[in-house]
Image (tube, helix red, strand yellow):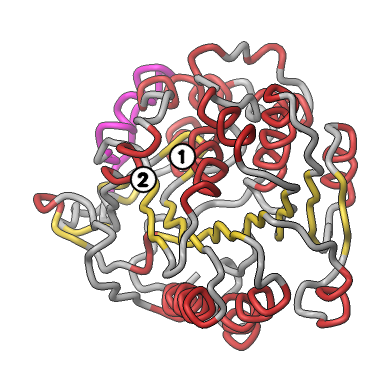
Amino acid sequence: MNASETNLGDLKTELDIELALSNPSPGVVETMSRVEGDILVLGVGGKMGPTLAMMAQKAGAAAGVCKRIIGVSRFSDPAVASRLHSAGIETIQGDLLDHDFLRSLPDVPNIIYMAGMKFGSTGNEGLTWAMNCYLPGMVCERFPKSRIVAFSTGNVYCMRPISAGGSRETDRPDPVGDYAMSCLGRERVFQHFSESLSVPVLLFRLNYAVEFRYGVLVDLAAAVWNREPVDLTTGYFNVIWQPDANAMALQSLAHAASPAEILNVTGPDITRVREVCARFGEIMNREVRLTGTESDHAFLNDSGKAFKLFGEPSTKLEDMIDLVAQWVMRDGISHGKPTHFETRDGNF
C-alpha cells in the first residue's frame, strides 16, 4: 500500500487502520501463489503482527489459493484477536514458552516468527533472554520441517559513522546492552538449528517500521505538535512504512535457506532528525525546539540486498512525513508507546 493513496478520513477505528495498512503488493500476491501451505504467525499480537497476517490473508485470496493464516499470541488485549477474526484470521491464545502449548500448535510449512521482548528488558533480563534466545530453539525443534522468517533488528550492529552509510549483512555484529545481545543470541540459535536440523531460515533485520499509530516519525511529530523539545544526540535514523516492511517479510518466505539467510530491511534514506522536525514544523505551523548536539554515529542499515530482491519500498519518506503529521494533528489513534530510538546505551 502506498501511503500517498490513503484517505485519513476513512480511518476511524483500529480495524480501519489495519485493513488500510494490509493491502498486498503484487510481489506478495505472487509469493503467496508459489509458496505452498498455511502460515503460522508467532507473536501476532504485537505492533506489526495484525497487519502482516491480514496482508497474507488478502494476498492468498488475490492469488486464488486456499491458505489458513493462523495467529498465535497471549492476546493480552482481546480486541486484537477480535480484529483478526473479523479479517478472516484464525487465532490461538497461549504462552509460547509453555512446552505443552507449543506442541499443541498445528503443523504448518511456513512460519513468520515475530515473538520477542524489547521494552521492559532492563530489569527483566532473565525473561528477555528466555524469550529472545531459548524460545527460538524450542520453535525450531517443534517445527523442523517448516521454513521460518524470523524478525530481528538492526540493533545487533554497532553504531556507525554517518559518512560510512548503513551496516551491511556481511558486517560483524557488535550489540550493546541486554536487548541487542539477546537479539543476536536469537539469531545464533536460529542459525544453529538451521544447520543442525536443516531448517530453512531467514533472519529479518528490521529498523525502523512506522505507521500512523507508532514509530520514530510519530514520536517526532508528537513532540513538535506538543511544543516539546527534541534531543538531537541521536540525529539520524532509517525508516520504512510498515506495509512495505510486512510485504518484504512475506516475500522472504521464498528466500529462507539452510544455512540461514540474513536480510537488512529499512528504507533507502538516511534521515536527519533536524530536517524531519523542520518539515513537521512547517506542516503544523509550530516552532521547533531542538536540544543537544548531533552525534556523528547512529544505528543505520543498508538494505541494498533487500532492494535487489524486492525493489525499493513503494512509500517515500515525504509521504510518510506528511501523513503522520496530518494524523497527529487530527489526534488520531495512537499506541502510546514511544520507540526510544534515541537510546544509545542499549537499555530499553
Dot placed on the residue nearer the N-terminal end, 1 or 2: 1
Q: Between residue 22 and residue 69, name the one nearer to us.
A: 69
Task: Locate residue 195 relative to residue 91 in the image: left or right.
Answer: left
Q: Please say whether residue 103 is one of the residues in the magenta stretch.
A: no
Residue type for callout 2: Val
Mark 1, residue position: 223
Above or below: residue 9 compared with residue 295: above
Q: Between residue 169 and residue 82, name the one nearer to us.
A: 169
Q: Position of residue 236 (x, y in %)?
A: 26, 47
Task: Locate residue 57 relative to residue 165 in the image: left or right.
Answer: right
| Span colored in magenta | 271-291
Q: Please identify the quarter of the rendering in which residue 142 is found.
A: bottom right
Above or below: residue 107 compared with residue 1: below
Residue type for callout 1: Ala
- Residue drawn at the location 65% of the way across and 64% of the way down: 115
Q: Please identify the quarter of the rendering in which residue 122 is found.
A: bottom right
Mark 2, residue position: 230
Q: Within 10 Å of the Cα at label 2, are there few (<14), some (14-19), or many (20+) other Cα atoms?
A: many
Label placed on residue 195:
none
Instruction: Examine the rendering and report whether any part of residue 288 can be seen.
Output: yes
SS assignment at label 2: strand
Q: Position of residue 314 (x, y in %)?
A: 42, 24
**Which residue is farthest left?**
163
Task: Locate residue 128 relative to residue 18 in the image: left or right.
Answer: left
- Residue drawn at the location 53% of the way across and 58% of the way down: 151
